[in-house]
Image: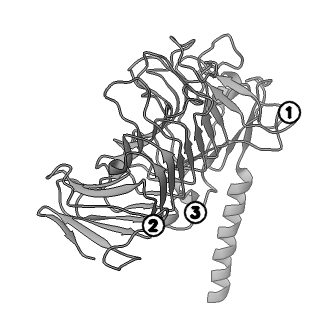
């Protein structure tokens, strides 16, 4: 009887899961759609997505929930600034406030098995597209792409946040994000995920312009809620078709501001700021490529960053399997965890970088000791690293420039795991 009861419970659970999956709805959005359509088939798509100000009729009354998908047709473009273009999102940008549920939406592999059944998916079906072949759907701020620095913007992006994902348990996937123009010092961002358990993946961020009077302070992604889990993975941030994108030693553009808890498998290329943490929580940064990153041109008192954290990382921090090369930034890799925690920096490759004193920079907040596990990292002779404390600013108690074309980091013969504990009384080498 006990076995039969257990079997009945398992069958009931499986039936509920199948029923819930079967009840999930896929909604479709296309540039030739109508908001009066049902939105539930590729032949009857909406013109807008729920949360866009110009969404109306059936689109505005639809309830997108756990397990549902919102599919944008490949190759179509949605306009955020040019009200004469179609489809125009509407004034104020797109705020998507729908949420999945926590029951079967776990995106953090460190917390358990990754499951996405009750997440909401916002992205693509690569079998559905306009034109001869699939291309990502475009979300554009409508400025022309240019490698020059214009005197002014056709549509000034500064101060605007075009997309807010305020819901939780979301996956945003496979978009082409372009056309921002930074024309003043008033901030803003293209995408701002404010919910928790949110993933932004497989997107292509590119084609921004900076005016001659701009301040280069418009991130593609700004994470403003500093305790929420946000994963940013498998994206490309590439300014090759942006202002200064073809000029040697000069870049502009901002990848991620505020930081997500996990940033992995991204490419950061031809920009002045890849990652800068101010409000976000850094948990794990791994398997990224950072290359051709240079300080912003012509902006007094501003330095660029490959990855700078200024102490907004309670708990342990992991930085591993990254490649940083062919760059010259004001700050390279700068980790600054809070006290009574540990930072694990391993299996990174750094080569052909300028400004070696800022190439890899480990620091301490004034709130307790930190243990750095710094192991199996590869530097060439142009690159260096240092450890310092805010209590003793820029004190070069322990710095080493490695020699040889590619040298493996080691201390006193210990190669694989070298803990360096930095306390209030200075620096102690446990190696």
Q: Where is residue 146 shown, x and y percent of the image?
A: 62, 21
Residue 43: numbered disc: 1
Residue 298's spot in the image, x, y percent?
Answer: 41, 23
**Farthest residue toward the left?**
425
Question: Relative to residue 93, is residue 4 depicted above or below?
Answer: below
Side (left or right) of 401 relative to 11: left
Q: Is residue 384 above or below residue 344?
A: above
Measured Cα–Cα span from mark 3 to mark 2: 37 Å
Determine the residue located farthest toward the right in the rendered image: 132
Determine whether 34 is above or below 82 in the image: below
In the displayed structure image, the side of residue 11 where residue 103 appears, left or right: left
| 421, 80: nearer the viewer | 421
CB contact under 8 Å: marks 3 and 2: no
Q: Residue at 63% x, 37% y: name it.
A: 63
Nearer mark to the viewer, of 3 and 2: 2
Residue highlighted by disc 3: 114
The residue that disc 2 covers is 407
């Amino acid at each position: 009887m006990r076995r039969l009861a257990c079997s009945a419970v398992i069958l009931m659970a499986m039936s509920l899961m199948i029923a819930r999956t079967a009840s999930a709805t896929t909604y479709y959005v296309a540039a030739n759609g109508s908001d009066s359509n049902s939105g539930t088939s590729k032949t009857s798509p909406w013109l807008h997505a729920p949360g866009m100000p110009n969404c109306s009729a059936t689109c505005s009354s639809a309830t997108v929930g756990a397990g549902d998908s919102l599919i944008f047709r490949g190759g179509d473009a949605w306009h955020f600034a040019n009200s004469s273009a179609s489809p125009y999102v509407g004034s104020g940008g797109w705020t998507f406030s729908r949420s999945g549920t926590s029951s079967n939406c776990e995106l953090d592999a460190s917390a358990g098995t990754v499951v996405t059944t009750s997440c909401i998916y916002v992205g693509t079906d690569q079998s559905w597209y306009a034109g001869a072949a699939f291309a990502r759907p475009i979300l554009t701020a409508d400025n022309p792409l240019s490698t020059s620095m214009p005197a002014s913007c056709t549509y000034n992006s500064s101060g605007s946040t075009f997309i807010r994902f305020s819901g939780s348990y979301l996956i945003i996937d496979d978009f082409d994000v372009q056309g921002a123009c930074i024309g003043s010092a008033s901030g803003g961002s293209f995408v701002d995920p404010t919910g928790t358990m949110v993933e932004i993946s497989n997107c292509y961020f590119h084609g921004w312009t900076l005016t001659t009077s701009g301040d280069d302070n418009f991130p593609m992604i700004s994470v403003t809620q500093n305790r929420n889990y946000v994963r940013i993975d498998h994206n490309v941030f590439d300014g090759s078709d942006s202002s200064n994108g073809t000029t040697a030693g000069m870049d502009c553009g901002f990848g991620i501001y505020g930081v997500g808890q996990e940033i992995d498998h991204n490419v950061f290329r031809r920009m002045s700021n890849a990652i800068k943490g101010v409000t976000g929580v850094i948990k794990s940064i791994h398997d990224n490529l950072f290359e051709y990153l240079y300080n912003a041109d012509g902006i007094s008192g501003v330095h660029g960053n490959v990855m700078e954290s200024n102490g907004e990382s309670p708990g342990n921090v992991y930085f591993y399997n990254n490649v940083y090369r062919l760059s010259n930034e004001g700050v390279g890799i700068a980790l600054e965890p809070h006290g009574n925690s540990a930072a694990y920096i391993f299996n990174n490759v750094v080569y052909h970088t300028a400004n070696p004193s800022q190439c890899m920079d480990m620091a301490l907040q004034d709130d307790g000791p930190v243990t750095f596990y710094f192991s199996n990292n590869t530097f060439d002779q142009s690159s260096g690293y240092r450890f310092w404390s805010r209590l003793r600013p820029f004190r070069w108690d322990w710095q080493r420039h490695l020699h040889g074309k590619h040298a493996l980091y080691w201390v006193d013969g210990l190669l694989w795991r070298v803990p360096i504990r930095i306390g209030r009384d200075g620096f102690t080498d446990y190696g």
